[in-house]
Image (cartoon, helix red, strand yellow):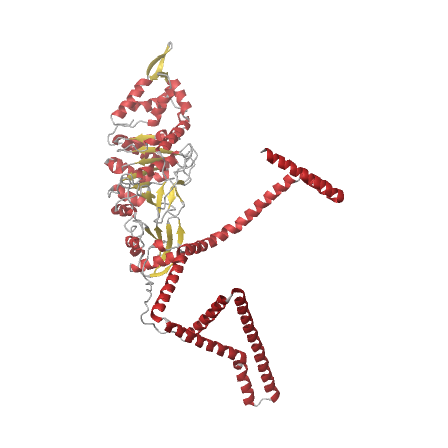
Amino acid sequence: MAWLVLVGVGVRHRVSRAYVSWVTYWPALAYLGIAGRALARWQGWRWLATAARRTARLVWTGARRVLVPLWRWAGPWCRDAGAWLVHIAPRLAARLAWRGVRVAVWWLAVRGMPGVVRLSGLAVVGAGWLLARIGRYVLAYRDYGPLVRELEVEGARAHRVKQARDAWRRTAYRRLTLVTLLCGGLALGVSAVVSRHGAAAGWAAALTGWAVLAGIGRARRPRSDRPGMPAMPEPDPTEPFPIADAHTRAQAADCVSRAVTAEGIELRAVESAQRRAWGWETAVVLRKGTPAGLVAKVAELETTLDLPSGGVLAAPDRARRARVVLRLAERDPFAGIALAPDHPPASLSLRDPQTVGVRMTGEPLRLSLLGVHGVVIGGPGSGKSQTLRTLADAVSACVDAVVWDLDPAGNGLEVLGGAVARSERDARGVEDALAEALAMAEARPKLLSGLGMGDAWDVSAERPAVIVFCDEYPRLSDRAKSLAVDLIRVGRKARVTVILASSEATSDTLGAAVAEFTALKVMHACRHADVRLTLGANMVAEGWRPDRLNPATGESPEDAGVCYVHAAGARDPILNKISLVPSGRAKVNGSHRAARGLPRIDVATRDAARALTPAAVADGSAEPVDQAGVADVLAAFGADDRLWTDTLLSRLADVDGRYRGWTAEDLAGVLAPLGVRSAQVKIGQRNRNGYRRDPIQGAWEGRRSRGEQP
C-alpha cells in the first residue's frame, strides 16, 4: 500500500505546481480556490439537504396519490398483457412459424416450378393492376371527365368548359410529376443500396418487388381450394378447456362460459374475471332456471375445469337472483395464514367484533359475540375444538366478559388455564353451571331499570357478560340439554350466552333451537344432513356446502379449521379459516390474564340469581355452591390455617369489592353447602368465632371427587 501513498503524494504535488503556475499567468483563477473553500465551509448545506429530502418526500407522496389509483386501474390490464406475452405470444409465434414451414414444404413438394410460374403470372397481374391504378390516378379522369362531359352536354359557355379542362390538365401534370418523383426516388434508393451492398441487395430488392406484385395479383384473383393441401384443424369455439390454460381475464371468462354451457346451463353473460392469489373469481348471469341448478353442478365443473376437489365454490347473489359468483381455487386459499392475534390481558372489549380468522376473499373474519348464541358443528378432525379455543382466547382478553368452560367428555379449554373463570368436567357440575347461568339470565332483566340500563344488559368491567363454552353437546344429560336450550331462549338480553359444539346437528331440542335462535353458526366438515338441520333446508342449494370439506386424516391437515360462517356480516357462502392459537401461547395468555385478575360477576346478579337458583334446581338436586366465593375464601386465608370471622371478612373485602359490606351471615351462607360451620378458634391467648382452612379445603375437594358441583 506504500506505493499508492507515494503515487497520491506525487499527483497532489504536480497538481499544486500546475495550479500555482496557472494562477501566475491568470490571476483570476485564484478566486476559484477561494470560492471552493467558501462553498465547502457554507453552513447552509445541511439546511439544503433537509429541504431536498422534504421536497423529495412531498413529491413522492403526491406521486403515490396519482400512481396508486392509476395502477389499480391499469394493473389488471398490465397483468393481462404480461400473461399474454409470457404464455400466449410464444405459442402463437411458434404456431405461425410451423404453419409457414408446412406451407413451404407442401408448396415445394406439390407445386415446384409450376408454382414459380404461377407466382410470376400473379406478379404480372399485380403489375398490370398497379399500372392501371397509377394511370387512372395520373389521368384524373374520374375527377374531371364526368364534369367536362356534363358541361359540354348542357351547352355551357366556352370559358367554363375551358376552365374545367385547364384544371383537369393541371391536376394531371401535378400527379404525373408526383408519381415520377416517387418512382425516381425509389430507383435512386435501390441503386444506392445495390452500390453499397452489392448485387445480393439488388436481387433481394427484385424478389421483394416480385413478391409484392404477386401478393397484389393474389388479392385481385383469389385462389381456389388446393387439392392435396392438408387442412389445419380449427379448434371448436365451444370446447371447454382447463382453467390453468387461462392467462388473461378474457380467457378466464371464456373458460368459465364454455364449462358452464357444456353442463347444459344457459347463460346471459359472464362478467369480467378477477385474479386472486388462489385462482380466479368471476360472476355468471343465468338466462333461466335457478342458482340451485348451477350449485348442483359444482362437482362436474371441477372435472371440466381440471380443479382439485372442492375447487369450485358457487355463491348466489342475494341482491340479484340471476347472478352467481364462482370462485375457482387452483391453490389452497389459506396457505401461509398467520396465527391468531395475540392480545394482552384486558385489551379488548366484547362490544367490538373480534378477529378470529381469515375469509377466502382475503378480508379478516370478524365476529361479534355480544349477546350472541352460537353453535359449532364439525366431525372429528374438523377443527371445532380449535375454533372454541380461538373464540375463548379472544373473549378472555376482554375486560368486560367472563369465560365458562363445560366439557363432559374431554379437556375443554384447559390450555387457557387461569383465563377461565369456571370449568366443569362431570355431568353434575355441567348441570349446575348451566342452571346458574340460566338463573343469571332470568335475573338480570329484572335489574335493568334499577341500574338505569336500557333494553339489554350494559356490559362493563364491573358487570361483565358471561359466555359459556360447551363442547360435546351430545354427551350432555337430558336436563343439561334442556337448560342449554332454555338459556339460548332467554340469555341474549342478559348477555349470558352459550356457544355449543357438536360433532353432528342432532334433530332433538338443540336442532330446533339452533335453527331458530342462534345467530352464530360455524360449520366445519360435517354431514350433508347437518347442513339442513343447522342452516335450513334450502341452504345447500344456496351454496352452503361444508359437507364437501375434508377433516384431518393422519398427518395431513386437509381442511381442518376451514369452515362456513353464518353470522352478522357474513351471510354469503364463502370459505373461512379460523386462525390457530398454539397451546403454548394459550397457556401463557391464561397465566398472564389470571395474574392481572379476571372480571367478576357483580353482586347484584349473583344475589338475584341465588334467589332464583332453588327454582332452577327444584328436581331435588343439592344446593349449588358459590364457586367463586369459596375460591376467594380459600385465597383470603393465605398462609394462615385459621382466622377469626371478622379478620376473614376484612381480607375478603381486600380480595374483591363485592365482599364489602358482607356480614358473618353472608359468609356462613357461602360455606353452608359445604357443610362447614363457624366454631371457636384460638389465636394467641384469645378464643373467638372463626373458621379453619383445612375443613373448608377438605369439603371442597371431597365434593369434587364425588362428581358434585364444587
The image shows residue 663, relative to residue 605, as above or below, that is above
Q: Position of residue 8 (x, y in %)?
A: 63, 37
Q: Depth check: give the residue in front, 530 or 275.
A: 275
The image shows residue 74, relative to residue 10, as above or below, that is below
Q: Quadrant of residue 578?
A: top left
Q: Residue at x 29, y 51 (%)?
A: 538
Q: Residue furthest front?
A: 199
Q: Residue furthest top?
A: 685
Q: Position of residue 592 (x, y in %)?
A: 40, 29
Quadrant including the N terminus: top right
The image shows residue 126, relative to residue 265, as above or below, that is below
Q: Is residue 135 left or right of residue 478?
A: right
- Residue 37 in view here: no
Q: Depth check: give the residue in front, 495 or 133.
A: 133
Q: Is residue 522 left or right of residue 220?
A: left
Q: Position of residue 22 (x, y in %)?
A: 73, 43
- Residue 235 in view here: yes
Q: Is residue 368 left or right of residue 10?
A: left
Q: Residue at x 58, y 89 (%)?
A: 156
Numbered circles on residues, count: 0
Q: Position of residue 236 (x, y in %)?
A: 32, 63
Q: Quadrant of residue 47?
A: top right
Quadrant including the C terminus: top left
Q: Quadrant of residue 628?
A: top left
The image shows residue 515, relative to residue 107, as above or below, that is above
